[in-house]
Image: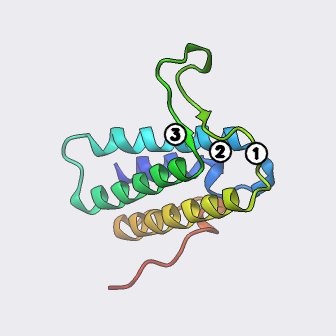
Amino acid sequence: MARKVVSFVEARRVLFSTYTNGAPEQYVAAVLEIRDFLTAVIGEAGIAAELREPLRIMRRYCMRFLERVGASEDHHDASASGRHLFRERRWQMRDYWFGEELGELRAGISFQVATIAAWFGLDVEDELARTLHEPDAS
């Protein structure tokens, strides 16, 4: 299961791509996808305790990012497929606070991925690996 999680996040450019390579809506959509994936994995039976807590922390970083950038999910709006609606429509990628929240998301998730990789002895692909922090040796 740990390999499945690492493989999933390795392919999520929101966690490592150049900041200007996307639009806010794309980043929010990617974070929603990550959050939903983590929720599904956490809900699976037999998940190792050493994996469960890092996944919960990663999901909290996703939820915090979504809250702080004003993303919401309106399940009653069919025109938006029930997702990706923003309380503040004027924000841009160049807005300092959006970048700050994206940086916090990336740092938080990358630390948890590093923890999972170290605990389970997994390799991480280069693009994501460059963002990883060294987990504590304790």
Measured as percent of width and height from the top left, residue 105 is found at 55, 60
Q: Mark 2 falls on what kind of element? A: helix
Earlier sequence position, callout 1 versus callout 3: 1
* Tag shown at residue 13: none
The amino acid marked with disc number 2 is Tyr
Please tell me whether residue 125 is drawn above or below residue 73 in the rendered image.
below
Q: Residue drawn 36% across and 55% down?
A: 55
Q: Residue 27 carries which label?
A: 2
The circle drawn on residue 32 is: 3
- Position in image of residue 11 (x %, y %): 60, 46
Q: Residue sitting at 69 percent across and 60 percent down?
A: 99
In-front residue for pair 65/51: 65
* Residue situated furthest top in the rendering: 78
Q: Disc 1 marks which residue?
A: 22
Identify the residue at image location x=33%, y=42%.
Answer: 41
Q: How crowded is mark 2: few (under 14 residues within 10 Å), some or many (20 or more)?
A: many
Tell which residue pokes out farthest to the bottom in this image. 138
In percent of the image, x 56 and y 41: which residue is there? Answer: 71
Q: Please name whichever residue, 59 or 79, is drawn nearer the observer in this view of the structure.
A: 79
Of the 4 image quadrants, the one containing the C terminus is bottom left
| 107 is higher (above) or lower (below) than 92 | below
Q: For residue 36, what is the image quadrant?
A: top left
Q: In which quarter of the image is residue 40?
A: top left
**Amino acid at the residue labelled 3:** Leu
Q: How many marks?
A: 3
- Marks 1/3: CA–CA distance: 15 Å
Compare residues 83 and 133 and report the one nearer the observer: 83
Amino acid type of the residue tagged 1 in the rendering: Gly
Q: Is mark 1 on a helix, strand or loop?
A: loop
Among numbered discs 2 and 3, the one appearing first in the sequence: 2
Residue 85 locus on image (x, y percent): 60, 32
Badge 3: few (under 14), some or many (20 or more) residues near its Cα, within 10 Å?
A: many
